[in-house]
């Protein structure tokens, strides 16, 4: 997945500063790789490739070890998300209430799969595993805001894509 067309790449100085600040905040803590990665992603919106060797060196890990952790956890992004992040619940309750059809509709409408951004760069589609709205399935989250009892038509309305 490439950088969405409307987002400029981050400068190396910005990446280095955010990475060093995250390393400083968690210096000396046991098991600090995950908190550092979360900090970098929270600050920059993703974990740029250029942050990996800095983190690896500071923690005396190989780049492969750091990259392995980033790629193992689906929460971590290596490219920027679009301005709109759509998370579709993939948990059992939502699946039983039409979540599979909703996910298929979202993918068709956006023209991309999960962990990807629509061709126009406007929406990033991500899976999420339970939003706590099981009694109101299927559910989605758009930019951190949950929506319940979502149908394909309601999703189109929420995204402003129309029928």
Image (spheres, grey):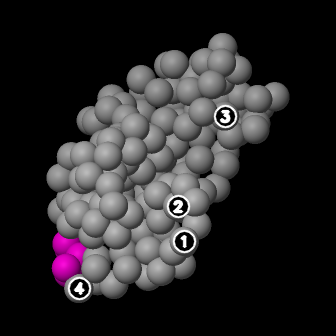
Q: Which mark is residue 13?
A: 4
Q: Which residues are magenta?
A: 8-12
Q: Which residue is mark 3?
A: 130
Identify the secondary structure beneath mark 2: loop
Q: Calculate the distance from the C-alpha at mark 1 to the C-alpha at mark 4.
A: 24 Å
Sequence-wise, the earlier of marks 1 and 4 is: 4
Whole-percent x, y for residue 61 in the image = 32, 55
For disc 2, the neighbor class at 10 Å (few under 14, some 14 to 19, many from 20) is some
Among numbered discs 3 and 4, the one appearing first in the sequence: 4
Report which residue position mark 2 lands on.
32
Q: CA distance from mark 2 to mark 3?
A: 26 Å
The residue under the point 33% across, 61% down is 60
Res 69 seen here: yes
Instruction: Report the front residue among 149 and 28.
Output: 28
Determine whether, in the image, residue 113 is placed left or right of residue 147. left
Residue drawn at x 23%, y 85% as measured from the top left: 13
Q: Which residue is tagged 1? A: 28
């Amino acid at each position: 997945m490439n950088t969405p067309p409307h987002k400029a790449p981050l400068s190396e100085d910005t990446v280095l500063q955010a990475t060093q600040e995250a390393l400083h905040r968690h210096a000396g803590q046991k098991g600090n790789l995950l908190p550092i990665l979360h900090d970098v992603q929270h600050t920059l919106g993703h974990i740029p490739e250029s942050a990996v060797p800095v983190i690896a060196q500071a923690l005396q890990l190989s780049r492969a070890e750091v990259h392995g952790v980033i790629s193992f956890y689906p929460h971590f992004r290596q490219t920027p998300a679009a301005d709109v992040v759509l998370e579709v619940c993939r948990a059992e309750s939502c699946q039983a209430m039409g979540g599979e059809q909703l996910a298929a509709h979202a993918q068709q409408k956006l023209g991309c799969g999960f962990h990807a951004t629509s061709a126009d760069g406007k929406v990033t589609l991500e899976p999420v595993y339970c939003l706590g709205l099981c009694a109101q399935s299927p559910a989605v989250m758009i930019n951190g805001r949950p929506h319940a009892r979502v149908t394909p038509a309601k999703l189109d309305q929420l995204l402003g894509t129309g029928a």
